[in-house]
Image (cartoon, rainbow, N blue to C red):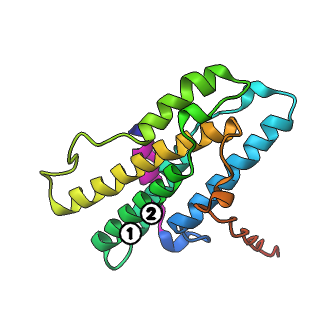
């Protein structure tokens, strides 16, 4: 939670007019982060040091959700925007879950991952809510909370996908249809000297 507060503060404290690059849309941010994971996985599989790979890190999913909320906060209609963001994250989580193989279908050289970890993260990704986590607050806080909770559900689905990708038990997100190739980042012009 402390990390989230730091990210939000850093994003809000910087005047948006002074930024050279606008905050990315949620889908564009997710496409970039999925591509980053695929690159890291390829480096791990091809590289000499297998101990440096993080099988499942979903901080980037959290980052994309936070950026989405900040984009909504600076929009003309923050509450409808956050409701749309919640729906977008829940729809993406459903697509990710649909791409996951059943635990009994996953087998591989890493038994501690395929037999131990994957069934647990798969169950978390397919878990049920204990109830409405966001009720009882003001409308503004409730809508924000619902967008954050949608991001948590998406994080669990992406975590399960990352473990399945590590086990080579599921296709890339692009092949599964829930992500697109990231749009190339346009280089920023350097200021002229003199």
Would you identify the image quadrant in which residue 31 lies? bottom right
Residue that mark 1 sits on: 72
Q: In which quarter of the image is the C terminus?
A: bottom right
- Identity of the residue drawn at 78% across and 71% down: 190
Disc 2 from disc 1: Cα separation: 6 Å
Who is closer to the viewer here, 24 or 89? Answer: 89
- Percent x, y for residue 148? 35, 52
Question: Is 106 on the left or on the right of 194, as rendered?
Answer: left
Under tag 2, what secondary structure? Answer: helix
- Identity of the residue drawn at 39% across and 62% down: 69
Q: Does the magenta stretch include residue 7?
A: yes
Magenta residues, as a range? 3-15
Under tag 1, what secondary structure? Answer: helix
Who is closer to the viewer here, 184 or 169? Answer: 169
Would you identify the image quadrant in which residue 176 lies? bottom right
Say whether residue 154 is visible: yes
User: Are the two marked residues, 2 and 1, in contact with CB atoms closer than 8 angstroms?
Assistant: yes
């Amino acid at each position: 939670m402390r990390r989230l507060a730091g990210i939000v503060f850093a994003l809000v404290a910087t005047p948006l007019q002074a930024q050279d690059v606008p905050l990315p849309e949620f889908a564009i941010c997710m496409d970039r982060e999925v591509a980053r994971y695929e690159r890291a996985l390829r480096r791990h599989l091809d590289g000499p040091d297998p101990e440096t790979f993080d099988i499942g890190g979903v901080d980037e999913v959290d980052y994309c959700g936070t950026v989405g909320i900040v984009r909504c906060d600076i929009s003309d209609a923050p509450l409808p925007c956050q409701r749309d963001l919640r729906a977008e994250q829940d729809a993406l989580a459903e697509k990710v879950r649909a791409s996951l193989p059943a635990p009994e279908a996953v087998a591989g050289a890493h038994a501690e991952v395929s037999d131990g970890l994957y069934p647990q993260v798969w169950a978390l990704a397919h878990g049920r809510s204990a109830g409405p986590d966001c009720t009882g607050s003001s409308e503004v806080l409730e809508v924000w909370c619902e967008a954050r909770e949608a991001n948590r559900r998406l994080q669990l689905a992406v975590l399960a996908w990352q473990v399945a990708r590590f086990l080579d038990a599921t296709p890339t997100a692009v092949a599964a249809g829930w992500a697109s190739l990231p749009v190339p980042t346009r280089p920023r012009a350097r200021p002229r000297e003199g």
